[in-house]
């Protein structure tokens, strides 16, 4: 095992010496302070390293033993990976993302020791079954809507028996900051806001209640530990261990068993209410734009007629 002790200074020095991505790639990876993109990019990655190592260590797991294979699922331009350069010298650290320019940049500037490949918007990954000891995924399932179950099943497939997955989620801390509404976990379940929004605008936002994660994700993984975010806008984290002997499919993960978990019904009703409210807001915006355009149109026509009369 490669001990965690004494690597923090080396990790900091290696990260500071490593090249930084172009500003658009850093911004696409998601930063809390767009006014200082690169500083914010580095800070989020540094904090993610501390959180990942702390959560693994609390379960007695040491990161980066020789021969281990680790995957950063949804790595962007390496925001988190770049802070694990020392560990990548003794194990294989891979990243994958749907954004080809980000992957090209990693392989051009940070390989070796990092390695990265492009994946499609839906499974599968171009990796054999049982090929990774650990997968982490930061700020990915917080945006996955239509393919969340397929991707979770895919992570189960590429993990070795008893492999670990560490995934961030949005709970009460982000929900209250995002919606200005009280967090009521019994009626949240899996809740999607801004479904279908383009990635250039941040994509959709997905919230999860702990009970819902245990009910659905727990069909494929044993939940080792779950930490809900407490500070405003703080992500939650769940550490999962791959369960063997289970045929994990998207249908299994998506299935609703209201008899076993009666909160499912109220969670669905709440999602419908939110979709209705969102639809009403969008309709009002559309109607307001149409009305404004209707008022502008006669003035433009009148102006054109005046030009024609003046011989222009």
Image (cartoon, rainbow, N blue to C red):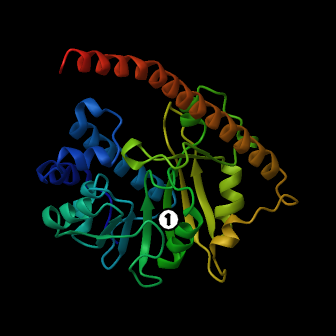
Give me the residue at 75% from left, 46% from top.
267
Relative vertical location of residue 308 with respect to residue 164 in this rendering, above or below = above
Give me the residue at 71% from left, 40% from top.
185
Q: Residue furthest right?
A: 259
Q: What is the quadrant of the N terminus in the image?
A: bottom left
- x, y percentage for residue 104? 20, 65
- Using the rendered view, name the quadrant where residue 137 is placed: bottom left
- Using the rendered view, name the quadrant where residue 120 is placed: bottom left
- Using the rendered view, name the quadrant where residue 147 is placed: bottom right
Say whether residue 160 is visible.
Answer: no
Give me the residue at 66% from left, 80% from top.
246
Q: How many marks?
A: 1
Give me the residue at 21% from left, 48% from top.
12
Front residue of 73 and 23: 23
- x, y percentage for residue 256? 77, 62
- x, y percentage for residue 73? 40, 64
| Left or right: 153 as drawn, with respect to 31 | right
Relative vertical location of residue 1 with respect to residue 285 in this rendering, above or below = below
Front residue of 203 and 136: 203
Q: What is the quadrant of the C terminus in the image?
A: top left
Say whether residue 248 is visible.
Answer: yes
Q: Which residue is tagged 1?
A: 165
Relative vertical location of residue 92 with respect to residue 217 in this rendering, above or below = below
| Left or right: 55 as drawn, with respect to 90 | right
Classify mark 1: helix, strand or loop.
strand
- x, y percentage for residue 79? 29, 52
């Amino acid at each position: 095992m490669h001990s965690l002790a004494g690597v923090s200074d080396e990790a900091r020095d290696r990260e500071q010496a490593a090249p930084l991505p172009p500003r658009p790639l850093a911004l696409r990876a998601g930063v809390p302070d767009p006014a200082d993109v690169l500083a914010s990019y580095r800070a989020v990655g540094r904090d993610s390293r501390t959180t990942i190592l702390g959560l693994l260590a609390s379960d007695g797991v040491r990161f980066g033993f020789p021969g281990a294979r680790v995957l950063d699922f949804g790595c962007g331009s390496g925001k988190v990976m770049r802070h694990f350069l020392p560990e990548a010298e003794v194990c294989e650290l891979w990243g994958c993302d749907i954004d080809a320019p980000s992957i090209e940049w990693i392989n051009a500037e940070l390989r070796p020791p990092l390695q990265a490949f492009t994946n499609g918007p839906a499974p599968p990954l171009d990796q054999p079954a049982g090929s990774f000891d650990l997968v982490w995924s930061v700020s990915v399932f917080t945006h996955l809507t239509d393919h969340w179950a397929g991707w979770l099943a895919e992570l189960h497939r590429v993990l070795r028996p008893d492999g670990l997955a560490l995934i961030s989620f949005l709970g009460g801390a982000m929900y209250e900051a995002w919606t200005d509404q009280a967090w009521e976990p019994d009626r949240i379940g899996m809740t999607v806001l801004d479904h279908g929004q383009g990635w250039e605008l941040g994509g959709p936002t997905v919230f999860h209640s702990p009970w819902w994660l245990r009910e659905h994700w727990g069909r494929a993984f044993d939940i080792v530990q779950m930490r809900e975010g407490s500070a405003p806008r703080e992500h939650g984290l769940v550490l999962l261990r791959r369960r063997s002997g289970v045929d994990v499919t998207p249908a299994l993960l998506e299935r609703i068993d209201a008899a076993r978990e009666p909160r499912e019904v109220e969670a669905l009703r709440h999602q419908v209410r939110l979709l209705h409210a969102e639809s009403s807001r969008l309709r009002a915006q559309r109607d307001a734009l149409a009305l404004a355009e209707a008022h502008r149109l006669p003035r433009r026509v009148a102006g054109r007629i005046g030009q024609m009369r003046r011989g222009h």
